[in-house]
Amino acid sequence: MLNDSLSKTLNEQLNFELYSAHVYLAIAAYCSGESLDGFANFFMVQAEEEKFHAMKLYKYLNDRGKRVTMEGMDTPNNEYTSILEAFEHAYEHEQEVTRRIYHLSDIAMNDREHATIQFLKWFIDEQVEEEAMFDSIINKLKRIDKDSNAFFMMDSEFALRTFTPPAL
Ligand code: MG
């Protein structure tokens, strides 16, 4: 049986994953406004991933007999001065997600809630990937700097990113 404090924090995380989708859609909209359709696609796909993360938590809470509740969310940042700044914001956001997942894991370990510890392992691995991906893109963008050919090549490359949802 999941205790109320742990299930409340899992429900908060579900809502935070949806907020992440909101943050990335706002970045996608900024990119679209700059006619950078590849970068916009990258962030739209990222938003899809975040919705998938939220649904994973939704299913888990339901499977454990807990009632999911939806909360309101803050307005995300809609304005950026550059693509690099947008990616830096995304990277910081992912670091915040990681902190929250670790906090959840701490509670689960404290409660000796082994099923939840096991469930959260997927998110811990996912955060390693997310942070590595944003860190590597930021490094590339910094290296590209003012080379517009390389920049537009990256935009074309990101136009190809797709999301295929794995089984929940
Ligand atoms: Mg996520």
Image: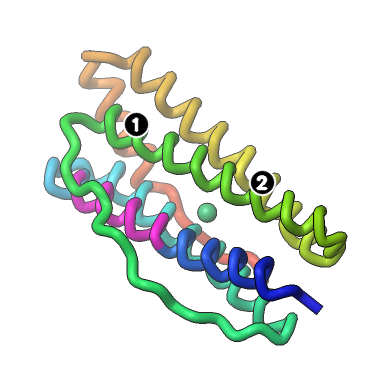
The magenta segment = 19-30
Residue 58 drawn at (x, y percent): 59, 76
Q: Which residue is mark 1?
A: 154
Q: Residue at x 39, y 60 (%)?
A: 19
Badge 2 local density, few (<14 within 10 Å), some, or many (20+)?
A: some
Ligand 1 within 8 A of label 2's CB? Answer: no
Q: Which residue is mark 2?
A: 102
Question: Which of the labelled discs sits on residue 61, or is there none?
Answer: none
| Amino acid type assigned to the residue bearing label 2 in the image | Tyr
- Say which element carries label 2: helix
Quarter of the figure with residue 129: top right
Position of 80 with respect to 15 (left or right) is: left
| Amino acid type assigned to the residue bearing label 1 in the image | Met
Quarter of the figure with residue 57: bottom right
Q: Residue at x 25, y 30 (%)?
A: 152
Give the main secondary structure of the magenta stretch.
helix
Quarter of the figure with residue 63: bottom right
The stretch drawn in magenta includes residue 165 = no
